[in-house]
Every structure is written in C-alpha cells, then in structure tokens.
Amino acid sequence: MMFYVVYTDLDGTLIDEKYSFKAASQALETLKNRGFPLIFCSSKTRGEILFYREKMGFSDPFIAENDAAVYIPKGYFDFPIPGAQSVEGFSVLEFGLDYESLFRRVEKILIGLGIEYETFKGMSVSELSLDSGLSLMEAALAKDREYSVIFKAECEDSILTEAFRGEGLIYTRGARYHHVMGAHDKGVSVNALSSLFRMVYDEVLTVGLGDSLNDLEMLASVDLPISVRRPDGSIEDFGVKGVLETEGVGPIGWNERILGILSEKTDLI
C-alpha cells in the first residue's frame, strides 16, 4: 500500500489571502482519516506553524522558516534522529543560521546598497498586523524569527538576489515580502524528512504543493510536485519536471488535487 507524505506551503497555497483554509477542509479530513502526514513547509516561524497545525488538527513534523529547521515530535519515529537537538518536546534538525548573525549580514548588505528597508522584527506588532493582514496574535508570532530575516523594500529582485548570493546567503521573494536565509533551501529538509519516512514505510510517495518561487526547492525534491494557482489566475512556472497545476485558486485548488491523488483517479494526477 502506498503511503503518502504531503508537504505544503501555507500562504497562498493551503491558506488564502484571508488566512482561511476552509476551502481545503474535505482534503484535510481525508488525510487525517487515511493516516497520511501533512508537513507544513513554510517561511512562517515555529510559533505560527504550531498555531495553524493546532487549528487544522495535525500533529506531524513540520519545517519552519524556509528549511531552516525540521521539528519532529518526540516519539514520532521509534528510532533516534541522527544529529537532532532536543527542543521543547521536539527533535530538531537545524540547517539555518541564527537570527542575530544573519541580520548583521543582511543589514550590512542593504545599507551598502543604499536600500531603505523594514524588517518584521523592526515593526511593532500593530504595524505588522496592519501591513500584513495578520491578527495581532499572529503578527506577534511572525515577529519571533529564529533563522530568517523578512523585510519589505522597494528594490528589484535581481539586485537583491545578486547581492545576497554574493555573500553566501539565500534570497527569495515571497508573495508579499523579501526573505533571506543562510545557505540552505527547502529541499534539504524535505529530503532529510522523507528519508526518515522511508525507513518506516516500504512504499512512500511524496507530494509537494506551493505557489511561488520560494517553494521551488521543495517541489524539486518531491515525487509529485504541484503548482497552486494564485488569486489573479496566474500560476508559477517552476520548471520542475512533471509539475502539475491546479485549476482552482489557493486552498480550492489544493483541495481538488489532494482529493484526486488520494482517490487514485488517474485522470486527475
């Protein structure tokens, strides 16, 4: 029997612009009923992901801040996780730089380019809530970054990409903000976590869903990559072999594809 592991981005993919996942409820319940894990793989912080994880009723591992850390609940696998640290009930695999070290490097680059910027951590909770549309509680969780710097600035992506990569950092542009991380990507954690599932199950098929270039490495690391349509009707061309597209937008398309895969309707996959 095939065991499915679903990796998913959150913003614009499983949750819509109003931060709702209601449209994906049927597929989420089907995953729970079948006992297949849902792995949140997002630029969001540990606290933000725990918030959505609890709201959706899942207790599987998750990947925070664009592959910076994999959080595996203690006892989830019945064997020790090589290289993991113990953090508040989780075995954690760290791939990213700590925030303070990273911010000092980011700040130096942006000042050198003469770019005015504002980071999540630099905004007050109320300012971030107003700017992002997050609730005050969610904004507070979003500010608590451990491995990545998220900022807003008026600048060409190509300039930032060249500048950060020249300093050995990873730069991506999310749906709303600029993201900078240490030299790692979502593919590292997806591969690490998938290898653990393959130690337990004979047949594992990994599925990945995302909507922006920030999800490229995640989709390149799964067996079945899916590009989720955006609210304006556009869809990211990831250039990944075998990538599928959704007809519906955001969680509507997410729901449609996951149900199609789990029902094994070959015309949908």
Image (spheres, rainbow, N blue to C red):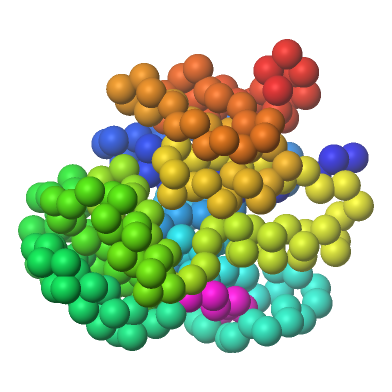
- Quadrant position of the N terminus in the picture: top right
For the residue pair 59 and 109, the one nearer the viewer reads as 109
Residue furthest to the top in view is 267
Which residues fall within the magenta stretch? Answer: 89-96
Q: Quadrant of residue 127?
A: bottom left
x 36%, y 19%: residue: 233
Q: Is residue 99 left or right of residue 118?
A: right
Q: Residue, x 52% and y 68% (percent of image)?
A: 184
Q: Residue 215: x, y in percent?
A: 49, 47
Q: Residue 124: x and y, percent?
A: 10, 67
**Residue drawn at the location 12% of the way across and 63% of the way down:** 115
Pinpoint residue 83: horizontal percent, then vertical percent: 68, 84
Residue 106 shown in magenta = no
Q: Taking 11 as reference, is 37 left or right?
A: right
Using the rendered image of the protein, determine whether residue 28 is visible from the camera's viewpoint: no
Q: How far across and how far down the image is residue 258, in percent?
A: 62, 30
Secondary structure, magenta segment, majority class: strand
Q: Is residue 120 left or right of residue 141?
A: left
